[in-house]
Amino acid sequence: MAPSDIRVRFAPSPTGFLHIGGVRTALYNWIFARQRGGTMILRIEDTDLTRSTDEAIGWILDGLTWLGLDWDEGPYRQTERFDLYNEHIDRLLAQNKAYRCYCTPGELEVSRKEAMLKGTAAKYSGKCRNLKDGERNGEHTIRFKAPQEGQIFVDDMIRGMVMFDEDQMDDLIIRRSDGSPTYNLTVVVDDADMGITHVIRGEDHLSNTPRQIQLYQALEYDVPRFGHMSLILGPDREKLSKRHGAAAVDEFRSMGYLPEALINYLVRLGWSHEDQEIFSVEEVLKLWSLDDQGKSPSVFDHDKLQWLNGQWMKIVPPEQIARRLLPFLEKEGLITMSPEPGWLTKVVLTLRERAVTLVEMAHRAGFYFKELDYEPESAEKFLTPEINHLMGKAGALISTVEPFDHETLHSEIRGWLEEEGRKLKDLAQPLRIALTYRKDSPGLFEVMEVLGRETTLERIEKAREWIRNRV
Ligand code: GLU
């Protein structure tokens, strides 16, 4: 197969937020395609009209775009392809590979209970399989006549060879009584029609695979290769969901995570390369392989994701972080107008060592944008009458420092303190509280440079006034 013949797809059902498990499926397909010069297709599986929404389609498209997982074809929508599905269903009917089933829900329930009592497989009894024309009439579904004799082998790219006995296989409903086609039929028709060569999806679909292979065979289509990846679990080893905390890509995004970190985290789930933890997309494209993907499920580890995010806050260029920080600053109520980009980049440079997420960074950035209340214990401890005079002198010096950058500020203030027979540490905390209102802050001289001379002097004077008022 020429590299460019490789075609994969991400086929989400738009019934809710884009779940992190779905992101992982999209990511693996995307890497698989991009590594091989293949084609990535986006297909929206919206046949469940009661649960699919346009809003959810928007979440999927936004989420993928935010993560940088682009696609080459689509988005296709299954609801626009009903004619194609019906043609295939009619073909199966005409070839006697499918049949009309008139069993009512009541009848099906009775036979399900009988099977349960007998301890046999809970599958359709086959009652309508061999009806003669006109024997039953009225509302009906269409069922696929599933071959019952042999075995289906799935040579799974992740799980290895998996075998299924056909006598366990149900006569699947492929068209509901309301005329709508069902998942296993639409997915096979679409994957065949779209020329999908590799189906990479979650392990929860493994049990569908033999049914789908039977349909490929009945429709005389080539069967693609399959790869079923293990699921992501919560700490209780149940499938990861909302109740384990954030599980949707939008939530991680609004919690201030970076797409680079999320991708890095998902790639490392069930895959490793030596003892490396940080992987850029470029490295992933070079190193990652589906063949090395582990089979056992992975537990989602929020702490690890957070750690990775903290790392990526320092790797992503500061001007980019600055741009991404803007909506979070707005949410904190810190800006109404866009600050000057070069200045905001400097803000980021002072904060990125400590801030693990964009939310935290925006929160820590507060003092750059507005006056805050002093942390009471810190003000009590460090803004004392004894320091007032020295702070005044520092202000006088700061008003003359040229150029007004952190290196010059640092050396001049240190030199002056030495002459005064004082140490930097005598003054550092009081100044820090004066300028940032907190005792945990970025480097003092970097803060001065970013605040600028005027604001620095104003805040020193405010702190001295506070000291005077406390006596
Ligand atoms: N629409 C299915 C889902 O969201 C995926 C189908 C598939 O990948 O075959 O779970």
Image (spheres, rainbow, N blue to C red):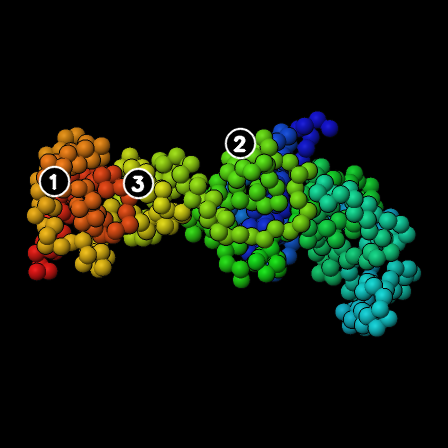
Residue 153, x across and y down, in percent: 82, 45
Q: Which residue, as the protein is rendered here, is positioned at the far top?
A: 2
Count of numbered badges drawn on the protein: 3
The kind of residue tagged 1 is Gly
Q: CA distance from mark 2 to mark 1?
A: 54 Å
Choose mark 1 or mark 3, whichever is in front.
1
Residue 290, x across and y down, in percent: 66, 38
Crowd tier of the residue under label 2, counting other residues whose Cα lies within 10 Å: few below 14, some 14–19, many 20 or above: few
Disc 3, SS: helix
Residue drawn 32% across the image and 40% down it? 348
Pointer 1 with pointer 3, Cβ within 8 A: no
Residue drawn 62% across the image and 29% down it? 37
Crowd tier of the residue under label 1, counting other residues whose Cα lies within 10 Å: few below 14, some 14–19, many 20 or above: few
With 290 as the anchor, is 213 left or right in this view?
right
The kind of residue tagged 3 is Thr
Image position of 58 with respect to 238: above or below: above
Query: Split into 4 quadrants, where in the image is the N terminus?
Result: top right
Residue 357, x across and y down, in percent: 40, 47
Image position of 303 with respect to 125: above or below: above
With 393 as the anchor, is 123 left or right in this view?
right
Whichever of labels 2 and 3 marks the residue nearer the N terminus, that label is: 2
Crowd tier of the residue under label 3, counting other residues whose Cα lies within 10 Å: few below 14, some 14–19, many 20 or above: many
Disc 2, SS: helix
Q: CA distance from mark 2 to mark 3?
A: 28 Å
Q: Which residue is mark 3?
A: 350
The kind of residue tagged 2 is Glu
Respond yes or no on whether mark 2 lies under 8 Å from ligand 1.
no
Q: Which residue is mark 2?
A: 282
Residue drawn 38% across the image and 50% down it? 359
